Image (cartoon, rainbow, N blue to C red):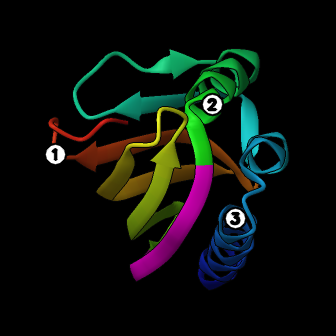
């Protein structure tokens, strides 16, 4: 049981490294299972690796420049990790965007099978 938690913690730290480097699409390919689900708040999840890559590509098309990626809190349990993140970027229309969110990831065999983002619904994500 302890080994699985250490492995999940290591994978989470690697994932955070990818995000900090702006390698979001690469992170999806590396850390998400083929049947992964990504869910925004209480919305229906996007299912499957290809659909989630497309969703993130669409999101990234609206980003002109990343300004800040901070991870305020990070935690791990058995096959579950979370982080509290603060992100700032400039949208393609020049608007500055600030997002504070919590992301909870559920893991299987070193890959994320479900990730849910919790944030203020007034946020532009």
The secondary element bearing badge 3 is classed as helix
Q: Earlier in the sequence, mark 3 or mark 2?
A: 3
Q: Which of marks 3 and 1 is nearer the N terminus?
A: 3
The stretch of residues the image draws in magenta is: 65-75
Which residue is under mark 2?
56
User: Whole-Å distance between the Cαs marked 3 and 2?
Assistant: 15 Å
User: Whole-Å distance between the Cαs marked 3 and 1?
Assistant: 23 Å
Residue for point 64% across, 24% down: 52
Which residue is under mark 3?
15
Circle 1 residues within 10 Å: few <14, some 14–19, many ≥20 = few
Which quadrant of the figure has residue 20? Answer: bottom right
Report x, y in % for residue 29.
83, 40
Q: Is residue 10 above or below residue 101?
A: below
Report x, y in % for residue 92.
55, 35
116 relative position to 24: left or right? left
User: Whole-Å distance between the Cαs marked 2 and 1?
Assistant: 19 Å
Q: Tell me the tag on residue 24.
A: none
**Nearer to us in this view, 15 or 76:** 15
Q: In this view, does 48 lie above or below 27?
A: above
Q: Tell me the tag on residue 120.
A: 1
User: Mark 3 near mark 1, Cβ–Cβ under 8 Å?
Assistant: no
**Nearer to us in this view, 93 or 67:** 93
Which quadrant of the figure has residue 3? Answer: bottom right
93 relative position to 54: left or right? left
């Amino acid at each position: 049981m302890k080994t699985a938690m250490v492995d999940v913690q290591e994978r989470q730290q690697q994932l955070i490294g990818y995000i900090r480097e702006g390698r979001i699409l690469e992170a999806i390919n590396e850390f998400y299972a083929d049947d992964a689900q990504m869910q925004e708040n209480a919305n229906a999840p996007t299912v499957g690796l290809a659909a989630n890559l497309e969703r993130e590509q669409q999101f990234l098309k609206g980003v002109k420049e990343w300004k800040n990626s901070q991870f305020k809190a990070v935690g791990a349990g058995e096959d579950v990790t979370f982080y509290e993140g603060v992100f700032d970027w400039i949208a393609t229309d020049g608007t500055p965007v600030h997002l504070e969110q919590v992301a909870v990831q559920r893991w299987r065999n070193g890959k994320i099978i479900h990730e849910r983002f919790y944030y203020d619904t007034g946020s532009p994500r």
